[in-house]
Amino acid sequence: MKRLIGPFAASIVLGLAAHFAIVHYAPSFIMDRAYTMLGERGTAVHAFNLAPQMRPDTQSVVRPSPDLAYSACRFDLTQAPGGIRVVMAAYDGYSSLSFFDAQTNNFRTIRGNGEAQEGVLVPKWATSSQEGAIYSPSDKGIILIRRLAPTDEDYARVVEAAKGDVCEALGE
């Protein structure tokens, strides 16, 4: 029995080390992969890209809501010294504007409530006095707009609303 204690203890230590490594590194890996995948699909840095209507043949993530229309913007604050101006155009129906950092954390969500929403995304260390400043805990991440669009007619309305969405780098 005593000779099993060493391998058992080593197994526990190795298991704990693997667990903590996965918990620490997985979010960065996942967000880096999502950031890269969006770029490969044509989503430019600092520009919203409306995804096609969610159907089995158009989904790129597991189980996206088929009732929602998604617009994504990749951001990189190292390329935007004055921050990033973000506008979610008004939409008559459910809409939300969500900000995700490089660790997959949702650090801010704003509901549309039928009105346009606007803000300036800046790094957390910035001393911005701009009204509507949103502080990002990381330099890179993803901004996601979700709008309720369960029918083809609703999706057509989203297409029109999305024309007013803005994700643009600001100068100094």
Image: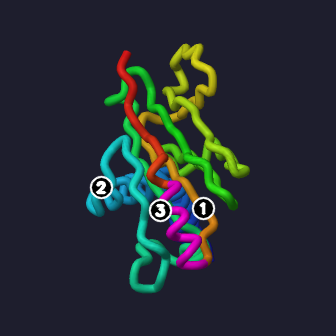
Q: Magenta stretch containing residue 33, yes or no?
A: no
Q: Residue at x 54, y 73 (%)?
A: 64
Residue 150 horizontal/vertical position (percent): 61, 76
Q: Residue at x 35, y 58 (%)?
A: 38
The image's mark for residue 46 is none
- Ranked by sequence position, the earlier of labels 1 and 2 is 2
Res. 77 image quadrant: top left
Q: Residue at x 39, y 35 (%)?
A: 168
Position of the C terminus by quadrant: top left
Q: Amino acid at mark 2?
A: Gly
Start and end of the magenta stretch? 151-161
Q: Secondary structure at mark 3?
A: helix
Q: Is residue 5 above or below residue 120?
A: below
Give the spatial CA distance, label 3 vs label 1.
10 Å
Extreme residue toward the bottom, this view:
56
Residue 52 horizontal/vertical position (percent): 42, 71
The 10 Å Cα crowd at callout 1, few under 14, some 14 to 19, many 20 or more, is: many
Q: Amino acid at mark 1?
A: Arg
Q: Nearer the viewer, mark 1 or mark 2?
A: 1
Name the residue carrying label 1: 147
Q: Secondary structure at mark 1?
A: strand
Name the residue carrying label 2: 39
Quick one: 5 or 124, which is closer to the camera? 124
The image's mark for residue 159 is 3
Q: Is residue 104 visible?
A: yes
Kindly check if marks 3 and 1 are in contact, taking CB atoms under 8 A apart as contact: no
Magenta segment's dominant SS is helix
